Image (cartoon, grey):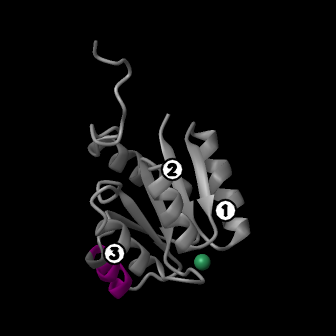
């Protein structure tokens, strides 16, 4: 089962998105701010991160830059979420290292398609992250 970390300070969005993702069979972790989210990602690396750009501590771009500068975490795909539909936001998201980008209000079929595409192309269990299932003799 794929695990998704959703970093978002708005409680209603966390509830809404978590419900949609769980309905699709994903396991969801949430964080209310970037610092908590980055700590959680380091502790329990998810398969994908949904990153709200407007967060109370660091903005999503800075949080993504930090994530992508960490060799242990940089392989995790990040989808940037913003309320803005400006081209500049898209460019900033990609420049910060985000793998894809989507806008609010949420359109779940579109967002789910982006999530599925990224999970399909990324390795869900890189060797450095997953312990062997059995011990060699
Ligand atoms: Ca927000």
Q: Secondary structure at mark 3?
A: helix
Q: Quadrant of ligand 1?
A: bottom right
State the mark number for residue 4: 2
The disc label shown at residue 74, or none = none
Specify the segment rendered in magenta: 87-94
Q: Nearer the viewer, mark 2 or mark 3?
A: 3
Residue 80 on image: x %, y % = 43, 69
Mark nearest the camera among 1 and 3 is 3
**50 w.r.t. 91: above or below:** above
Report if the beta carbon of the residue with label 3 is closer than 8 angstroms to ligand 1.
no
**Sequence order check: which comes first, mark 2 or mark 1?**
2
Q: Is any atom of residue 85 visible in this view? A: yes
Magenta stretch containing residue 93, yes or no? yes
- Name the foreground residue: 49 vs 128: 128
Residue 59 rendering spot, x and y as whole percentages: 48, 82
User: Residue 55 lies in what quarter of the image?
Assistant: bottom right
| Residue that mark 1 sits on | 14
């Amino acid at each position: 089962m794929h695990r998704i970390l959703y970093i978002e300070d708005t409680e209603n969005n966390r509830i809404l998105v978590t419900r949609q993702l769980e309905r699709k069979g994903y396991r969801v972790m949430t964080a209310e701010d970037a610092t908590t989210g980055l700590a959680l990602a380091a502790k329990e690396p998810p398969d994908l991160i949904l990153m709200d750009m407007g967060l109370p501590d660091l903005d999503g771009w800075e949080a993504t830059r930090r994530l992508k500068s960490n060799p242990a975490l940089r392989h995790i795909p990040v989808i940037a979420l913003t309320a803005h539909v400006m081209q500049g936001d898209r460019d900033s998201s990609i420049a910060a290292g985000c793998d894809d980008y989507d806008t609010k209000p949420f359109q779940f079929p579109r967002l789910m398609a982006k999530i599925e595409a990224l999970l399909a192309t990324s390795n869900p269990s890189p060797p450095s992250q997953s312990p062997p299932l059995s011990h060699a003799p």
